[in-house]
Structure formats: C-alpha cells, structure tokens
Image (spheres, rainbow, N blue to C red):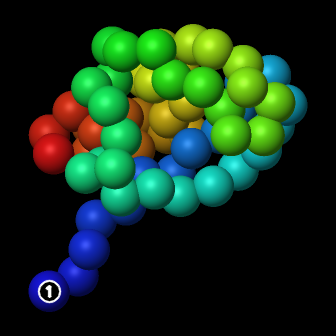
Amino acid sequence: MEETYVRLLCPECGKHWEESPSNLPDPARTFHCPNCHASRRLSEFARTEHDLQNMKSL
C-alpha cells in the first residue's frame, strides 16, 4: 500500500516539505511553519490544489 502525502510550502519563508495528511490538523486550523514559525491556516500551506484536496479528503 502506498502512503499518501501532501506537499507543503510556507508562504512566508518558502520552505518546501512533505507530510502525511494523518500527521496534519484540519485544513482550516492554524498551522505553524517548522522553519520560520509563521502562523496561517493549514490550507494556505498547500503547494497545489491537488495537495489541498488530499488534505481535505484524508
């Protein structure tokens, strides 16, 4: 079985990384960048629309 992941991009510092949706809060909740600690809704960290859809569906 292949694990699904989402690609994230911090809108403040530009850090790119991947996470399993099961390790992330609901897309509407506040999330903090592990690099610069910027605080925004998790949905704003989704790199693409596909990544956002994966967050919402899992």
> Residue at 66% of width from left, 32% of height from top?
33
Is 43 positioned to the left or the right of 13 in the image?
left
Q: Which is nearer the eye, 49 or 17?
A: 17
Q: Amino acid at mark 1?
A: Met
User: Residue 41's x, y, as percent?
Assistant: 47, 14
Question: Where is residue 39, by image quadrant?
Answer: top right
User: Residue 8's x, y, as percent?
Assistant: 56, 44
Mark 1, secondary structure of its residue: loop
Is 47 positioned to the left or the right of 13 in the image?
left
| Residue 19 to residue 32: above or below | below
Q: Could you tell me which quadrant the N terminus lies in?
A: bottom left
- Callout 1: few (<14), some (14-19), or many (20+) C-alpha neighbours within 10 Å? few
> Residue at 26% of width from left, 74% of height from top?
3
Question: Where is residue 36, by image quadrant?
Answer: top right
User: Residue 55's x, y, as percent?
Assistant: 29, 39
Is 27 positioned to the left or the right of 34 in the image?
left
Q: Which is nearer the eye, 47 or 24?
A: 24
Please tell me how many numbered marks the rendered image carries. Answer: 1
Q: Could you tell me which quadrant the C terminus lies in?
A: top left
User: Residue 25's x, y, as percent?
Assistant: 32, 31
> Residue at 28% of width from left, 65% of height from top?
4
The residue carrying mark 1 is 1
Is 16 positioned to the left or the right of 5 in the image?
right
> Residue at 36% of width from left, 15% of height from top?
29
| Residue 10 to residue 29: above or below | below
- Is residue 50 something that shows in the picture? no
- Is residue 27 something that shows in the picture? yes
Q: Which is nearer the eye, 13 or 47?
A: 13
